[in-house]
Structures are given as structure tokens and as C-alpha cells.
Amino acid sequence: FIDVKRDIEANLTLDPSAKRAALANLEVDGTKLEDLALDFTLPGYDIELREGGKNIGVDASNIEDYLNEVLETFVGRGVQVQAQAFRDGFSKVFPVTDLQSFSAEELSMMFGNAEEDWSLDTLNESIKADHGFNNDSRAIRNLIEVMASYDGPGRRAYLQFITGSPRLPVGGFRGLNPPLTVVRKPHEHPLRPDDYLPSVMTCVNYLKLPEYSSREVMKQKLGIAMKEGVGSFHLS
């Protein structure tokens, strides 16, 4: 709505009355701003953005003020107390002011570099196969190919599931300590390996992987575990 409003206001072919008429009938994809029934309260919460906000409707004349106040509440003054609490807690471990010595690029390297090496060679060198698997096992080869196929969100989800963190440490997979270890997860008759989900011990980067019948089954089971099991905790 704001972009359309600005286009109308910047249109030099329209006289003032035509602009007022266009703004009064402002639509995006056939929907008028008034159809959204917005007022000056925080979306999803019973919190007024300004005094009497429940009684102030959002229209073309104040849509920018509304969005600015929503953003300010979500990421500005609305989280000042929480941000200060985080700052105070972090400073008890490492003074926040000392971080000013580092550039943004250096901080990115320390706290997780987005440019990670997920190549087949790196994964093959970094994974430790044990207890039923070796580096030549079909399951290990399939796992490496599955890992190398992940896109950005897939990598974050996989790392969160395996290590408890969505990013690799400095040094990438080679920097994991202990190294990423993959062992064979046994099955009990009459069940088959394909009937099981993989499980992990995140504190030691330890993946228990059933010997799936195919790479496709492995990717499917890993996807389920990454999505459904990331928030669970079980003793084994």
C-alpha cells in the first residue's frame, strides 16, 4: 500500500484533486486498505501503539505512521528492556564494548560464517564413521551426498539437529569438537532399518543412522527427524 501511495503522490500527471481521489480509492490486488480493518494496535496483541489507538483506523493518510510504530515496537523501544538484559548478561562473560575492536566481517567469522564448505571432499574428510560403518560404507556415501545437496535452510536445520547449533564453528566441519561421528543404528526384528528415524547425541556431535535401503529413504527420514525431533529430548 505504501509503494502504491508513493507512486500516486509522485505522479506528476495527476492534479491535487485527482491524487486525493486516487488515494481515497487506494487498492492493492483488489483490496482496499480499509478492508483490512487495521487500527493502531500491535498486530496479534492487545497493545495500543499510541493513546487511543484502538479507536484510530489505518488509512492512506496514516499508513506510514502505523508501519513505523509497529516496527519501532517490535525492534525498537518495545524490546529495549530485553536487549539491555541480554547486553548485561553477555557482558558478564565478555564485555560487549570490547567487541567494538572487531569489524563486522571478523564478528561474522567468530560467531558463524555464512559461507561454509559443504563440498563432498570436505564432508568425506570431516565425518568419522564408526561402530558398524566405515568411510566406504554405502550409508556413509549416501549421507555425504544428502548433506551436500542441502540448501541454506536445509543446512541450518541439519546442523541444529546434529549439533544443537544452526551454524558451524570457526573452521567449519573440521572445527567440530568432537568431530561429527556417524554410527550404525541397529534394528530389531521384525522391523527394518527403514522403519526407524535417525537419532543424535548433540553434546558430542554423534549421529545414530539406520542402514537405509536407499539414499532417497535416508533423505526422507532425516528430513522428518530434523523437523519433528529437533525440540525433543530423550534419555537412551
Image (tube, rainbow, N blue to C red):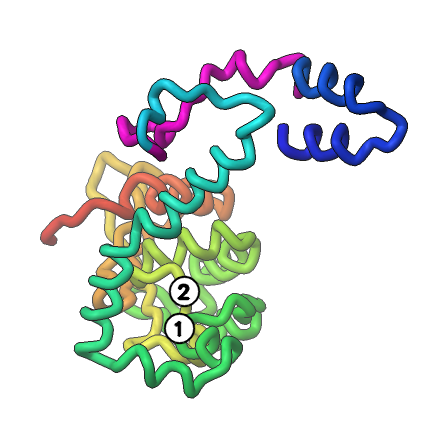
Badge 2: residue crowd in 10 Å (few <14, some 14–19, many ≥20): many
First to last magenta residue range: 27-50
Q: Is residue 141 above or below residue 18?
A: below
Mark 2: which amino acid?
A: Arg
Which part of the image, by quadrant, shows the N terminus? Answer: top right
Please name the residue shown 49% across and 61% down the image: 144
Please name the residue shown 50% across and 76% down the image: 104
Q: Position of residue 164 (x, y in %)?
A: 29, 60
Please name the residue shown 43% across and 70% down the image: 112
Please name the residue shown 40% across and 27% down the image: 40
| Sequence order check, earlier mark of 1 and 2 | 1
Q: Which residue is mark 2?
A: 167
* Mark 1 touches mark 2? (CB < 8 Å): yes
Image-quadrant location for residue 127: bottom left
Mark 1: which amino acid?
A: Phe
96 in the magenta segment? no
Q: Which residue is mark 1?
A: 111
Q: Position of residue 153 (x, y in %)?
A: 49, 50
Label 1 vs label 2, nearer the camera: 1
Q: Position of residue 211 (x, y in %)?
A: 36, 51
Measure the C-alpha gap from mark 1 to mark 2: 8 Å
